[in-house]
Amino acid sequence: MELRHLRYFVAVAEARHFTRAAERLAMAQPRLSQQIKALETELGVQLLLRTKRSVSLSAAGEAFLAEAYQILARVDRAVTIAQKAGRGEIGRLRVGFVSSAAYNVLPELIRRFRISRPDVELVIEELSSDVQLQRLRDGHLDITFYRVDMESVPPIPASGLVRETVLSEPFVVAVPDSHALAGRTTIPLAALAAEPFVLFPRRLNPGFHDLIVRLCEAAGFTPKIAQEAILMQTIISLVAAGMGVSLVPASMAQLQRAGVVYRPLAEAGAHSEMAAMWRADDASPVLAAFLLTMRAVARQEVAGRLQESP
């Protein structure tokens, strides 16, 4: 028995007429009659009661029709699910991100992806960069978003991972609002030489930490690290508490907190890179759809920044 036999039987049962059923199926009536007869022979029961003028269902036919409906409905559902999965419209995506990603492209990316793929389950975890990398390699995350110093970190194709820059944004200085530097419109890095710094721990993201240190060294000093914090929100809170100053990505200026102000750096070219990383061998259609949305959001973000530039 094949699925087509079920469809043939359902067509005849609904039409109560072989000729009309054959027309609906776009097949010859004699062939349809042969197929139904073969089905009855295989089952060993009579499904249809035939007269010269009508066709009706036997008791066996009534029972078989109910089951045939369920089987065909499940088959149709299986086909639909398979097609949706192949297009990345259903499934699961596990996303890791550092705290600062929540202040730039990630919220818009998640919003758009949920609109375009409402049936995809998104599992989102805020994690430090080192934990993200390990969970990505172990297969517990599908894609990660983290801060990286693209100049000091070597290419990684040999690791089986793919990295792509999503956003490049300038650094700003976070200072207590009572600080003398808070009155400036821009702050040169050299003006921070004697200031205590609140920074992200190097052990959790060497690239991001080293980038800030390198920028300071290029301005002629090594930053005095007074306090470390693993979340950008905590760094800003510690600055507001007077623990020191910090260099943070410009998007963090959205985090308005009493006691802290943000000022642009006087130096041009001091930028922070937000990168995405995923496994090179991950052929998931859901991931592919997510990457397309990510690139569209990133392009729009770049276009918006260009329009804002003087």
Image: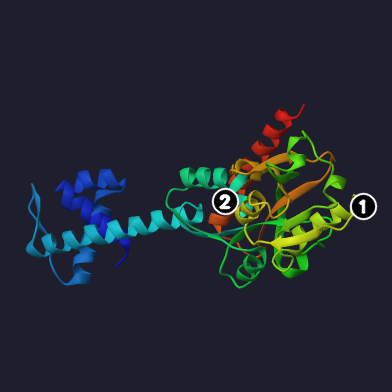
Which residue sits at x=86%, y=58%? 222
Taking the image as shown, residue 244 lies to the left or right of residue 143, namely: right
SS under mark 2: helix
The residue singled out by tag 1 in the image is: 220
* Between marks 1 and 2 in the image, the one whose residue lies nearer the viewer: 1
Q: Which amino acid does label 1 sit on?
A: Gly
Taking the image as shown, residue 261 lies to the left or right of residue 285, namely: right
Which residue sits at x=73%, y=51%? 245
224 w.r.t. 272: above or below: below
Residue 192 location (% of width, % of height): 82, 48
Q: Which of 176 and 112 is in front in this view?
A: 176
Residue 102 visible from this viewpoint: yes
Q: What residue type is labelled 2?
A: Phe
Taking the image as shown, residue 31 lies to the left or right of residue 207, namely: left
- Which residue is outermost to the top? 310
The residue singled out by tag 2 in the image is: 290
